[in-house]
Amino acid sequence: MRILQVLTYYRPHISGLAIYVERLSTALVRQGHRVTVLTGQIAPTWPRCERREGIDVVRVPVRGRIGKGVFMPSFAWHVARLGNSADIVHLHLPQFDAPVAAFIAHLLRKPVIITYHCDLQLPHGRFNHLANHVVGLAHRITAAAATAIVGYTIDYAVHSPFLARFIGRKLRLIPPPVSVAHCTETQVTQFRRRHNLDGVRVIGVVARLAAEKGIELLLQALPRILETIPNARVLHAGPSRHVVGEAAYNTQLTPLFNRYRTHYKLLGTLTDDELGAFYRNLDVLVLPSRNSTESFGLVQIEAMSCGVSVCAADLPGVRQPVLMTGMGTLFPPGDSQKLADAVVAMLQANAPRPTLAELVVESFRPEQIAAEYAKLYADTIVGRFTPDCDEPDAYRRLRNGSKRSNVVQTT
């Protein structure tokens, strides 16, 4: 099949959505499909056209920007040109330009699939309030032209104002594709030595520096953690400088980073090999996200696949990896004291590494997820699509594996 993937931000931009599409597209290519990604040329130095991992990437010039939103005057022309030769058009929301792509695909008689990654929830403010409504309207228009809408979990879907209306009508649940690069014991040891981690209890964070990620909660929890675990240190992997639309948030957190600089280290963006070694040096991964902009947290699965337990906010969708596997604990969203208590309890427990790592790897393997999408594409093309909101088999296997294993659920 010839598949056109459409999203605003793609690699080398770093976000869960961009990584999701890259993993899915790479796996589809390995299975013999032809994939083109249409995206924005966010940085002028990025090539307009290139081939990455067998994927044809076409970037539309960005002529203006408001916050994280971009203005791409030639977007419609590119959708028409590339959509004409595609068998299916796959849109990834949130995306302000999605109605244009959906309308053009409809004119071209091309089936439209949506993967809905999360609700958009911008910070308080008149402009952001208006933007939330405009994007919400754009998504509803897009959904009208779509045959199928993919979500991650039924937990998130029933709490999402957008997805809830499509349960039993257009919604299909497919797990996200997740993988972590293999790394050797030598690489793990070198990473530990490079960051002076001997004798240290390591708390990990993997996130770009964005307001919805709730990084300030962990910084606020740190003094309480250090009272009990004085050798604790936070390693934060992910972009922390020049994150689009997050200058004010960066400024807000800078004094806290300076105050706790001996116990909180910003690593920046890591290579795949470095990220694998990073996970294998953690005692616990923390996901302190604040709101529905986080719908699952792929980094939880990455950590669990390396045998690392997770402390995550008890948010719809976000809580599911911990609930499915028992590999971690949950805390009330926005409560830094409860976060501190949960992290301390996990570090004091000194529990052995959980035994479900291999099952986690298998359940979210990109090749398996790509095969599910390929079947969805084929069913949609021939008019055989049926909605299915039952729990995916991968999730059932994890729950059953958790019950049979010696993992102790700490929620």
Image: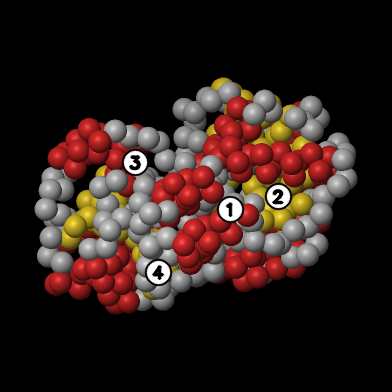
In the image, what residue occupies the spot 33% across and 34% down? 183
Q: Earlier in the sequence, mark 1 or mark 3?
A: 3
Q: Quadrant of the C terminus?
A: bottom left
- Residue kind at label 4, given as amino acid type: Gln
Of helix, strand and loop, which one carries label 3? helix
Q: Which residue is mark 4?
A: 409
Q: Position of residue 147 (x, y in %)?
A: 81, 50
In the image, what residue occupies the spot 46% across and 27% down? 45
- Residue kind at label 1, given as amino acid type: Ala
Q: Earlier in the sequence, mark 2 or mark 3?
A: 2
Of helix, strand and loop, which one carries label 4? loop
Of helix, strand and loop, which one carries label 1? helix
The CA distance from mark 2 to mark 3 is: 30 Å
In the image, what residue occupies the spot 22% across and 33% down? 186
Task: Classify mark 2: residues with Cα within 10 Å, few (<14), some (14-19) or many (20+).
Answer: many
Q: Position of residue 32 (x, y in %)?
A: 67, 25
The CA distance from mark 2 to mark 4 is: 34 Å
Of helix, strand and loop, which one carries label 2? strand
The label number, if any, that marks residue 371 in the structure image: none
Location of residue 228 (image quadrant):
bottom left
In the image shown, does 379 or 262 lie closer to the viewer?
379
Q: Which residue is mark 3?
A: 275
Mark 2 vs mark 3: give the one in front.
3
Q: Earlier in the sequence, mark 1 or mark 2?
A: 2
Q: Which residue is mark 1?
A: 394
Q: Quadrant of the N terminus?
A: top right
The CA distance from mark 1 to mark 3 is: 24 Å
Q: Which residue is mark 2?
A: 114
Q: Is residue 184 left or right of residue 39?
A: left
Outermost residue to the front: 404
Q: Are marks 1 and 3 in contact (CB under 8 Å)?
A: no
The CA distance from mark 1 to mark 2 is: 21 Å
